[in-house]
Structures are given as C-alpha cells and as structure tokens.
Amino acid sequence: GEQVEQRPPHLSVREGDSAFIICTYTDSATAYFYWYKQEPGAGLQLLMSVFSNVDRKEEQGLTVLLNKKDKRLSLNLTAAHPGDSAVYFCAVRDPTGGNNKLTFGQGTVLSVIP
Amino acid sequence: NAGVIQTPRHKVTGKGQEATLWCEPISGHSAVFWYRQTIVQGLEFLTYFRNQAPIDDSGMPKERFSAQMPNQSHSTLKIQSTQPQDSAVYLCASSLVDRNSDYTFGSGTRLLVI
C-alpha cells in the first residue's frame, strides 16, 4: 500500500523565517494531496488541498509544491510567527476506486521562536 | 456549522472494560472515517463508512474493535476488553462523498486505559 515519509520530524525556526517540510509518497497514481496542522489537544485543521494537476499552490503565506515525477510534496511556510507552532502532517488520498482513506506522514513538530 | 463533534473528549477506562466513542459528522456529509493517533504509530486509518454502509475496515484490529453507523447523524467506535495499548487519540472525520471533497476532523477522543 501507499507509504508516506515526512521530514524533518522536528523543525525550529525564528519568527519571520521560513519553514520547509517535505513528504515523499510511493504510489504514482495518487491524485489528492493535503497538508494539515494540529495544535495541542485539537483535531486536524486543513491548511491546503492540492489535486495532481497543480504543481504549485499559494495561499496566505503557505506554498505547496508538488513534484509528481519525484513523488514529492512540500510545504513552505513563509514569515513564520509563534502562532504557527504546531504539528504539521502531509496526507495523500488512496487512489483506488471507491476508497477515500488518507495515508499520513509521521508529522513535523514546528517550533517558531519569537 | 458546529463541525465534527466527538464525545467524550477524554475517557479513562480500566483494563478489561469497554469503551464507546461517539462521532457526529457534519450534516450532509455521507462519508465518515475513524483514525487512531499515537506517538509511536502516528495517524492510522481504522474504518470508513459511506452512506452509513461500512466500506473499508482494513485498519480495525480484528478483535475487540467494532464500529457502527446506525444513522446519518452519528457513528460509534466500540472497544471491548480495553488494553493499555489501546490508549490513543481517536479521531473522526467526515466529508462529502465525491473524491475531491475535503475532510473535516473532529477534536478527537483521548482514551487512556489504566
């Protein structure tokens, strides 16, 4: 089945700097990609979803890049602030017909230092 | 829109007891998912309902775990004879059925088996 690797597991940046997280996946048929943010004691908040016909998507200080050839998905968080401190997960949707389950990366704990 | 509602938020149960976790999906969402989150295993898919019918339970431990969706407004995850290794955060998510719909996650139920 699909496998998703995410790195780094921990990331510490200073306020105003960028934070870059990368995921690789294994199934070239995968078509739907997601980035989630999880704050302590909370569920998963969707940051951005990307379909496979998109190489780059930017929203509100976040940039998602999708490299289908290398099966790589990245999230760049520009001008980080302390409120961005959380755990970030990438996820891909199962490409097989009829099944919508997500496979998640292991998560990145982001700390933004004031 | 109150989002996906999970109850209880926290549950402590003794080893060998039964635990029932509840999920109320967003009204109109016909797809409901259960995931388990632990430090060691990360986010793991458990089971998926579509229009109340079980579609994929490949992630459910074969013994002691069961899930139902008796009506479109709630789903339950039941764990019989709980064990310490069942301690985790159990997350419920819902979405529209079509494949390019985004998931909405609940805040989760934190289960502690002592």
Image (spheres, coloured by chain):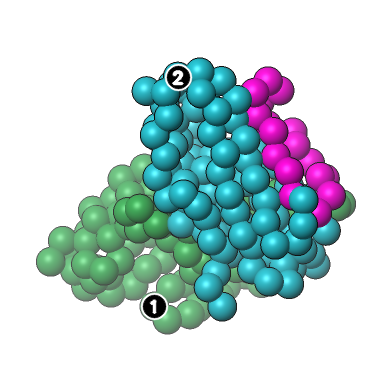
Chain colours: A green, B cyan
Q: Can residue A32 be seen here?
A: no
Q: Is residue B29 left or right of residue A44?
A: right
Q: In terms of depth relative to the viewer, which is nearer, B56 or B19?
A: B19
Considering every residue shown, the one lying at the far right of the view is A97
User: Residue beneath label 2, please?
Assistant: B15
Callouts 2 and 1 in the same chain? no
Indicate yes or no whether the magenta region holds residue B40: no
Q: Residue at x 33, y 62 (%)?
A: A19
User: What label sits on residue A61 in the rendered view?
Assistant: 1
* Left or right: residue B84 compared with residue B56: left
Q: Residue at x 42, y 50 (%)?
A: B9
Give the amino acid at mark 1: Gly
Query: Which residue appears at 16% of the width and 61% of the height?
Result: A113
Residue B18 in sight: yes
Q: Quadrant of the C terminus of chain A?
A: bottom left
**Which quadrant would the N terminus of chain A be assigned to in this image?**
top right
Q: Which residues are magenta?
A: B52-69
- In reply to whether residue B61 is colored magenta, the answer given is yes
Amino acid carrying label 2: it is Lys
